[in-house]
Image (cartoon, grey):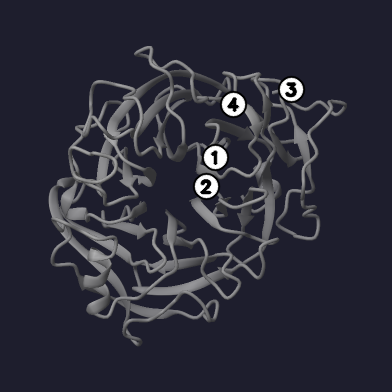
Amino acid sequence: LACRNENAEQPVSRSVINNETSHDGYGPLEPVIDQTTGLPLLYLPRNFEYLTFGWTGDPLLNGTPTPGSHDGMGAFSLASDRLLLIRNHELRRGVKFTNHPVYDVNAGGGTTTIEFNTATGTAGTAWASLAGTAVNCAGGPTPWGSWLTCEETVDGPGGDNDYHHAHGYIFEVPKEDTATAEPLRDMGRFVHEAIAVDPATGIVYETEDRRNSGFYRFLPTEINNLAAGGQLEMLALTDRTQADLRGRQTPFVWHPVSWVSIDDPDPANPSENSVFSQGFTGGGATFARLEGTWYGNERIYIVSTDGGNAEAGQIWEYDPTQERLRLIYESPNVDTLNMPDNICVSPRGGLVLCEDTEPDNFIRALSIDGSISPFAQNNVVLDGQIHGFTGDFRNREFAGATFSPDGNWLFFNAQTPGITFAVTGPWADGAL
């Protein structure tokens, strides 16, 4: 990829951080030209390159335009250097982008699936794989090759959005097919954010995005067959009932955990805390706005977007083998890390953190020993060059970070105006 243009006139970034002080950093960030558009849409370390695709408005296979509000995303292997990306669209209402499969004709969210060739660095066909869902925020990949997309709302019929069906569920999308558009009701109806699956057990871990949030696990009746049902439970600290983990926590101290059964995971007329209150009453722990979660290094990593004393973010680590939990990173200030959201684990073990804040948004690299550095900065400023989009989008969130299975490409989204990035470079030089 010949992406860099050292002499191009660049929009002025408001707070580019020089990360040379971190031993796990890749070096200072510089403006880099997008191979697709010729625009400097990202700041990256030297020797990293990228292209964009899957913009809002790009045509899908059925001829309809790609929907916006790109969010969570997963990558799945195919044969011959090919992979599929399944990408969420966090929309409440909107024009349907497919007639099948559709859960609720009045809901505008869903998923699209895109082919990508890792050898040539090119995107291929894209199609709608699920529609008619609402506020598809994050989700996560399964070991059996599907994507679980999560609704971040409990709205239903009779509300302002005039939905035909209840929302607040998880839906499964096969990697090479379209979804059934049937909610997985036993996995809970609440303000979902993300999931992570332990491949050793098939247990699915779930996060909840509220100020008072629980961390949940779903014990499937049949491994690899979530539609067969199962039991939802909420995490509790064994030595501290109803523990408040939103602040004043000591890093790297292990806490033994237990699990509280959720007797009514699919309440008929829920408030946002209907499921949480069941777990809390049974002694469950409270987190601050749980967002991304990901399996890696035989652990489950969990993001609290505004947890910690500075209310700028916490990263938790759950050990499913030993049934214990610890805080591995807390942001000391908003300049170091601010409002982390989606997360993924690189094939080399480092953590990728997507920020959702203002005025600037970064992708951060976090090593397991707690060293953090900026890897990418949003520099999307448009003047009608692509589908007529105009504006300064540098304050819009990054989302959907996921590595290609071979570890050579990092994919992520700028939620607004809706762009998917594919970045490659010397990953071994830093934490990722």
**Badge 2: how crowded within 10 Å, few (<14), some, or many (20+)?**
some
Left or right of 259 in this view: 354: right
Spatial CA span between label 4 and label 3 = 14 Å
Which label lies toward us, 1 or 3? Answer: 3
Residue 249 x, y percent position in the rendering: 52, 80
Q: Which mark, by number, is residue 117?
A: none
Report the front residue among 93 and 321: 93
Give the residue displayed 29% in from the left and 30% down from the top. 131
**Dot 3 amino acid type:** Ala
**Dot 4 amino acid type:** Thr
Q: Which residue is mark 3?
A: 2
Residue at the extreme top of the image, as rendered: 63
Spatial CA span between label 1 and label 2 = 6 Å
Left or right of 118 in this view: 183: left
**Dot 2 amino acid type:** Pro
Q: Which mark, by number, is residue 52?
A: 4
Secondary structure category for the residue under label 1: loop
Residue 82 x, y percent position in the rendering: 45, 24
Spatial CA span between label 2 and label 4 = 22 Å
Which image quarter: residue 263? bottom left
Which image quarter: residue 210? bottom left
Q: Is residue 122 above or below residue 420?
A: above
Which label lies toward us, 2 or 3? Answer: 3
Q: Which mark, by number, is residue 347?
A: 2
Q: Are discs 1 and 2 less than 8 Å apart at CB?
A: yes
Quadrant where the N terminus is found in the figure: top right
Q: Which mark, by number, is residue 407?
A: 1
Q: Are discs 1 and 3 less than 8 Å apart at CB?
A: no
